[in-house]
Image (cartoon, rainbow, N blue to C red):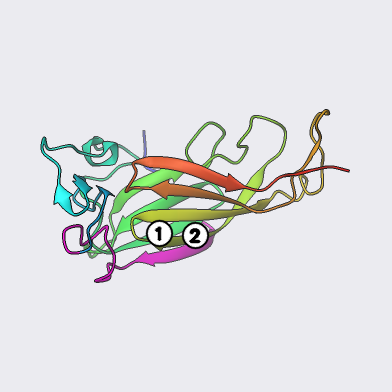
Amino acid sequence: MAAYNYIDQSIQASCLIEPKDIDSFYNPITQGHTGFAWDGQLYSAGVLQPGPVYASWYSEGVSAYRGELQTFPQTGLVLLSRVSLSILDGSTADLTLWMQFLVQDQYALADNWNGALNGWLPSGVIYADGVISVIYIPDPGNQNQTLTSPPAYDISSNMVVHLDFTQDAVYVDVAVGASV
């Protein structure tokens, strides 16, 4: 399977991954980090846990969607398009792919989070302390539409999907209000 061309596409948003001294993800011991750190290992209050215990993203094999570097990039560039999020390794001259997520139902970057006929479009991306958050806006055909009743919901708010590398998890924040 050929790798997705993550550079030659319409980029909706981007952000940099730049470790800071106060970033516990990159400084797990000095910042008392709890969770997985950039090296893929598990820490509790800054103490490396025995085992070692590695995050699933650290252990993932090389593929069209995963580069060779096991650890989280020391610096990076995140590119968000309507169809994917690509994390590029900033320590390489050619910005090699570290990991890529596709926007698709039932995937980590779902555009239809509850299986109903509603959807969101990726519009922004930010990075902080081992978490990449993708901001979605309602699909234009979805705004102020109601789902099945009862109850009916007005899906007109933004949604945020968090790719939390510290927890080795993906979770969503969305506000829905009952239709009147």
Residue 118 image point, x, y percent: 71, 38
Circle 1 packing at 10 Å, graded few (<14), some (14-19), many (20+), is many
Lateral position of residue 7 relative to residue 137, left or right:
left
Q: Is residue 114 visible to us here?
A: yes
Query: Residue 105 is drawn in which quadrant?
Result: top right
Residue 71 image point, x, y percent: 21, 49
Instruction: Name the residue beneath numbered marker 1.
Output: 78
**What amino acid is labelled 1 in the image?**
Val
Nearest to N terminus: mark 2 or mark 1:
1
Along the line of sight, which residue is nearer the eye, 53 or 11?
53
Residue 92 image point, x, y percent: 22, 62
Callout in the foreground (2, 1): 2
Instruction: Name the residue beneath numbered marker 2.
Output: 125
**What amino acid is labelled 2 in the image?**
Val
**Magenta run includes residue 106:** no
Magenta-drawn stretch, dominant element (helix, strand or loop): loop
Lateral position of residue 97 relative to residue 108, left or right:
left
In magenta, the rendered stretch is: 6-30
Mark 2 touching mark 1, by CB under 8 A? yes
